[in-house]
Amino acid sequence: MAEGAGRPNVEVVRGQSFEVGPRYSGLQYIGEGAYGMVCSAVDQTTGKRIAIKKISPFEHQTYCQRTLREIKILRRFKHENVIGIENIIRSASIDEMKDVYIVQCLMETDLYKLLKTQQLSNDHVCYFLYQILRGLKYIHSANVLHRDLKPSNLLLNTTCDLKVKLSLLLKTPLTCCTETSNPPTYCSTPPVILRDLKPSNLLLNTTCDLKISNPPTYCSTPPVILRDLKPSNLLLNTTCDLKICDFGLARVADPEHDHTGFLTEYVATRWYRAPEIMLNSKGYTKSIDIWSVGCILAEMLNNRPIFPGKHCILNPAKSCPPDLDQISHILGVVGSPSSEDLSWIINEKARSYLTSLPYKAKVPWNRIFPKADSHALNLLDRMLTFNPHKRITVEEALAHEYLSQYYDPDDEPIASEPFKFDTELDDLPKEKLKEMIWEETKFFSHQSK
C-alpha cells in the first residue's frame, strides 16, 4: 500500500488507486474479481474497519448492468443475512465518473475459504443453513432471484461462542463440586456462554465427570461438573453471522409478468446450477436458488462439491448436444428423471437427450454422507429434487425439522416492497446504464469526507 503521488486522498493497493480518503484510510488488500478489487479500510468517523469494493464497469455493458443491479437491489434491502451498502463514493460529475466505490461491512471470511480449512460440525451446518435460508426468504419475497448462490458468496464472521444446553444436561443431574443437593440458581437460566472453552480448561475427576475450569465470573461456586457434555449439547452463539453477497447476476421474477425468454441460461457457477438452467428451460423460478442451497448443504457435509462437472450448457444451435458432464454428475446421484419429471422441460432437444441416456438409479443419501444427520439428509433430498415444481420452497425448508431449534416465522422478515418487472434491465446501452448508476448513487454521500 502506498499514498497516491501528490494526491492526499488516494491510496494505491497493488497498482490500483483508491480515491476514498480522508474518511477511509489504512487500506489492506482482500481480493479481486473480473471487474473490481476489494480492500479493508478504517472508517475514520467510527474507527471501525469496513470493506470497500472498487468497480470500474463503464467500458463494458455487462459490467455496467451487473453493477447497477447490485446497487439497485442492495440499496433497498435491509436484512441481517444479506450484505448491505453503507456508502457509495464516486466522482462529483457523471463525466468524471470512472469508478464506483461500494462501502460495506467487513466480514472475516467466506464459506468457501472456511470449507477449505476445516470440517463443520452438525451444529455449524444447521446454523449456517438456517441463516442462508432466512436471507433467501427475504430475497425471494422481494421477487428477486439471486442466481449465483455458492460458498464464496456467503460471507462469515467466525468468532463463534459455544452455548451449553443446560436443559439437556439437567436430565442427568448437573451438580457442583460442593456436592450440594440444590443446584445454584444459574443452572436454570438460559444457556451459559463459554468464551474460553479449550482442552486446557476441561478437567476430569475420578468418576470421569467433565469439569470446566475458569468458570464464568457470575458463578460463585467452584467449577461446574457437566455430566453430559457432548457435541449435540453445544450450541453456536449467534455471533457466527452469515451474509449473502454478490447480487450482480440477480434478476427480478415478477409473478405478474411472463419472463420466458428473459431469464437466460448463462447464470450461476456451474457446480451450483439447477438442471432446468442447463437444459435450456428459460422460464425458471425461485427454485433454482433452492437447488444451489442444496448443493451448498451437501458441500458443508463433507467439504467437497457434490456435482463437480465440466461442460453443462445445451446449445440449441448445434444438431448434437455436447457432453453434458454436469447433468451426468447430477443424474448419477439423484437418478434418471421419470416421464412426469421430464414434462416441465421446454426444450424438446434436451428432453430427447435425457430420454436417450441409460437408466441411473438414485444413490441413497446416507451412502454418500454416512455420518450426516438424518434430518439434514431428508432436507437435502427435498432441495436436490430434479423436478423444480416438486422442489421444496424456502418457507417449507425453514419449517423443516432439521432447523426446528432456530425456526421462528416471527423473526424471519420479508421485504416491505417487492420489485416489479419495470425495475429490471435488459439490453440497455452502457451509456444509459451509466446514467442510471449515477441516479442510483445520488442517495449516498458520494464523498469520502
Image (spheres, helix red, strand yellow):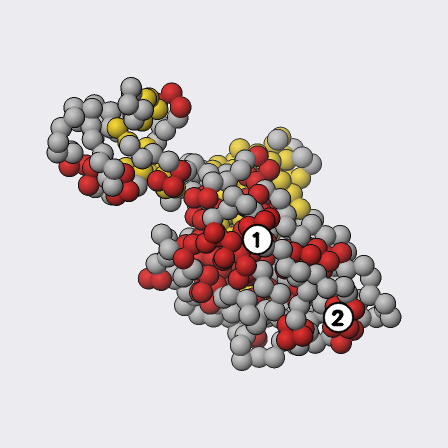
Residue bearing the label numbered 1: 365
Quadrant that contains the N terminus: top right
Disc 1/disc 2 C-alpha distance (Å): 24 Å
| Dot 1 alpha-carbon crowd within 10 angstroms: few under 14, some 14 to 19, many 20 or more | some
* Residue at 66% in and 71% down: 338
Q: Quadrant of residue 383?
A: bottom right
Q: Residue at x 15, y 33 (%)?
A: 184
User: What residue is at 38 percent from the left and 60 percent from the top?
Assistant: 412
| Mark 1 vs 2, N-terminal side | 2
Q: Position of residue 127 (x, y in %)?
A: 43, 48
Q: Are marks 1 and 2 in contact (CB under 8 Å)?
A: no
**Observer-nearest residue: 293 or 245?**
293
Q: Which mark is residue 153?
A: none
Question: Which quadrant of the figure has residue 324?
Answer: bottom right
Residue ID for mark 2: 355
Residue 313, percent from left and from top:
75, 62
State the SS at label 1.
helix
Residue 91 in the image: state x and y as whole percent: 59, 52
Q: Residue 354 is drawn in which quadrant?
A: bottom right
Q: Can residue 214 be seen?
A: no
Q: Which residue type carries mark 1?
A: Trp
Report the amino acid beneath label 2.
Answer: Thr
* Residue drawn at point x = 33 percent, y = 62 percent: 410
